[in-house]
Image: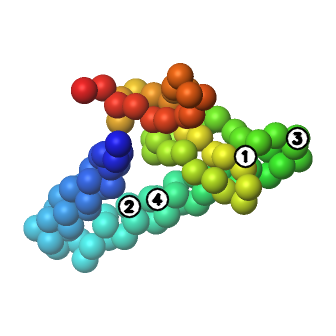
Amino acid sequence: MSEPNFFNISLSLIGYFVAWIDRNLRTNYRISHFLEKVYGFLFNQKTRFIKNAIAHAKRKKVDGVICGHIHTPQIQMIDGIQYMNSGNRTDNCSALIENGQGEREIVYPK
């Protein structure tokens, strides 16, 4: 099942809206530039969190990590460690489960 990417769609719509405000208020895109810096900072925080989780898993000699509430549900092998994130219940309505065959997957309500 492919995952919906509401987060990126929302960011695109917000970007268009802020650009429209910048144009109409003739702010020389100051609001857009500010928001791009904030988004870049938040993206770097998320990347750093994932790298730290993987490094911690390696130090503890475990096969994987399960995290939640980073807004992007995913199951991925990173540097030999299985990284799993359940997403969150408000943005994606996603959950991380282990099925009857012992495989982990992300599910969404129908």
Query: Which secondary structure lies at badge 4?
Result: helix
Q: CA distance from mark 1 to mark 2?
A: 27 Å
The residue where tag 1 is placed is 53
Determine contact: label 1, label 4, CB under 8 Å.
Answer: no
Asked which quadrant contains residue 11, the reply is bottom left
**Residue plotted at (15% across, 71% down):** 23
Q: For label 4, count other residues whose C-alpha is less than 10 Å away and answer few (under 14), some (14-19) or many (20+).
A: few
**Residue 28 placement, left or right of 40:** left
Residue toward you, 65 or 2: 2
- Rounded to the nearest angstrom, the CA distance separating label 3 from label 1 is 11 Å
Cα–Cα span, label 3 and label 2: 38 Å
Disc tally is: 4
Residue 29 to residue 79: above or below: below
Residues at discs 4 and 2 in contact (Cβ within 8 Å):
yes
| 91 or 62: nearer the viewer | 62
Q: Is residue 31 above or below residue 80?
A: below
Residues at marks 3 and 2 touching, judged by CB atoms closer than 8 Å: no
Mark 3–mark 4 distance (CA, rounded to whole Å): 33 Å
Which residue type carries mark 1? Ala
Asked if one can make out residue 104 in the rendered structure from this viewpoint, the answer is yes
Residue 59 at what x, y percent from top left? 89, 47
Mark closer to the chain start, 1 or 2 = 2
Mark 3 — residue?
60
Q: At 31% from the left edge and 64% from the top edge, which residue is drawn?
A: 31
Mark number displayed over residue 83 = none
What's the amino acid at mark 2? Leu
Looking at the image, residue 58 sits to the left or right of residue 101; the answer is right
The residue singled out by tag 2 in the image is: 35
Q: What residue does disc 4 label? A: 38
